[in-house]
C-alpha cells in the first residue's frame, strides 16, 4: 500500500513559525531598547510618534516588551518538540507536540487580534505609520496562518471554539488596557496623533506659577532648547512647561520646513544630533527633562510646585 505523502507545509510549519518568531523577537527587542533608552534611533518620524504615544505603554511597561515576551513564548513552543527524540520517547514527544500546537494556536490568535487593534489605532487614532509595528503585525498574522494550515487538526469544531474564546479574551484585554477617558485632567504628555506639518502639536497643558518662574529663570541664565516641531519627545518637554510658560522658554527650531522661525544652520553648527537637546552653561544635554531636574541643573531656587512632572515616568 502506497504511503500518503505528507504536505510540505506540515513538515516545515514549526520551523517557519519559529523563524518568524525570531524575527519578531529582533524587531520588538529593538523597539523596546529604543523606548526604554529614550533613543530616537527608530529611523522614521512615524515610529517615534508611535513609541512616544500613550498607547505605547501598558501602565509603565512598554507594549513592545509584551510583544517581545510573546514572540519568545511562540519560539519556545515552536521548537520545544525537537528537544525530544520521537524514536526513543514517542509518547512524550507526541504529548508535547499536541500541547504546543494548541498553545501556538491560542497565542497566535491572541497576538493577531491584538495586532489588528493596534493597526486600527495607528491608522485612525495616532494616524502615523511605523514600519516596525506593521512588520510585527504581519509576523503575527503569518504565524497564525501557519498554525492553522501547518498541521492536520483532528477536531475543527473545538479549534474554532478555542480560537473564538482566545480572540474575545484578546479584544476584552485590549479595550481594558486602552480605555482612557478623553478630556478632563491631562493624563499623558505624549501626542496621540501625527503632527500638523510645519507646526507640530497644540500644547494642551496650562502653566502654573512655578513653570512660568522657571521659564524666566532659564532665559536669564542663557539656557536654551534645540527642538523639531515633529519630535514627540520635544512635545512632551513643552507639555511639562505648559502653554504659557513655554512661550518664554528660549527655543531653537531645527526643522528646516518649520513654519515658525526655522534655524537648521544654528543646530548644525551646534552639533545637535538628537531632540530635544538642552544647552545649559554651554554644555549640551539630550533628552526630556523633568522641570525639577532643569531647576537643579540651572541652580533655580524658586517655586518648585511643578504640575506635570509626575506624568513623566521615564
Image (cartoon, grey):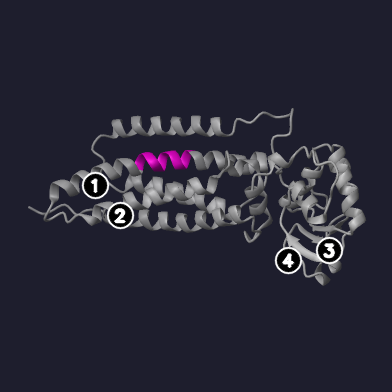
Return the x and y of residue 249 as percentages of the image width and height.
87, 51
Q: Which mark is residue 148?
A: none
Q: How many angstroms separate mark 4 from mark 3 (CA)?
A: 18 Å
Which image quarter: residue 101? top left
Question: 159 above or below 33?
Answer: above
Which callout, 2 or 1, points at the residue further toward the start of the chain? 2
Identify the residue shown where x is 82% and y is 55%: 298
10 Å crowding of disc 4: few (<14), some (14-19), many (20+): few
First in residue order: circle 2 vs circle 4: 2
**Can you tell which of label 2 and label 3 is closer to the viewer?**
3
Q: Is residue 236 left or right of residue 210?
A: left
The residue depicted at 73 percent of the width and 42 percent of the height is: 309
Q: Which residues are magenta?
A: 105-113
Helix, strand or loop at mark 1: helix
Residue designated by label 4: 273
Q: Are marks 4 and 1 in contact (CB under 8 Å)?
A: no
Taking 187 as reference, is 103 left or right?
left
Q: Which numbered disc, 4 or 3, marks the residue that appears first in the sequence? A: 4
Mark 2, residue position: 79
Amino acid at each position: 500500500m502506497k504511503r500518503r505523502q505528507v504536505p510540505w507545509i506540515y513538515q516545515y510549519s514549526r520551523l517557519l513559525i519559529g523563524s518568524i518568531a525570531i524575527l519578531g523577537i529582533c524587531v520588538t527587542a529593538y523597539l523596546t531598547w529604543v523606548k526604554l533608552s529614550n533613543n530616537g534611533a527608530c529611523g522614521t518620524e512615524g515610529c517615534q510618534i508611535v513609541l512616544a504615544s500613550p498607547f505605547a505603554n501598558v501602565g509603565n511597561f512598554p507594549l513592545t516588551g509584551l510583544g517581545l515576551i510573546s514572540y519568545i513564548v511562540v519560539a519556545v513552543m515552536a521548537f520545544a518538540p525537537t528537544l525530544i527524540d520521537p524514536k526513543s520517547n514517542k509518547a512524550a514527544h507526541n504529548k508535547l507536540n499536541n500541547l504546543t500546537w494548541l498553545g501556538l494556536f491560542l497565542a497566535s490568535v491572541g497576538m493577531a487580534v491584538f495586532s489588528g487593534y493596534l493597526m486600527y489605532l495607528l491608522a485612525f487614532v495616532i494616524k502615523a505609520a511605523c514600519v516596525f509595528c506593521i512588520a510585527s503585525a504581519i509576523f503575527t498574522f503569518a504565524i497564525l496562518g501557519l498554525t492553522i494550515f501547518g498541521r492536520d487538526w483532528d477536531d475543527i469544531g473545538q479549534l474554532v471554539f478555542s480560537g473564538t474564546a482566545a480572540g474575545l479574551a484578546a479584544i476584552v484585554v485590549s479595550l481594558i488596557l486602552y480605555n482612557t477617558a478623553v478630556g478632563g485632567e491631562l493624563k499623558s504628555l505624549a501626542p496621540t496623533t501625527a503632527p500638523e506639518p510645519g507646526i507640530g502639536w497644540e500644547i494642551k497643558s496650562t502653566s502654573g506659577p512655578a513653570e512660568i518662574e522657571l521659564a524666566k529663570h532659564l532665559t536669564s541664565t542663557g539656557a536654551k532648547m534645540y527642538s523639531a516641531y515633529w519630535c514627540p519627545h520635544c512635545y512632551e518637554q513643552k507639555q511639562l512647561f505648559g502653554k504659557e510658560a513655554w512661550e518664554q522658554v528660549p527655543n531653537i527650531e531645527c526643522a528646516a520646513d518649520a513654519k515658525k522661525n526655522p534655524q537648521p544652520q544654528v543646530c548644525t553648527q551646534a552639533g545637535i544630533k538628537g531632540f530635544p537637546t538642552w544647552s545649559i552653561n554651554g554644555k549640551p544635554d539630550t533628552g526630556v527633562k523633568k522641570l525639577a531636574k532643569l531647576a537643579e541643573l540651572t541652580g533655580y531656587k524658586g517655586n518648585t510646585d511643578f504640575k506635570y512632572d509626575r506624568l513623566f515616568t521615564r
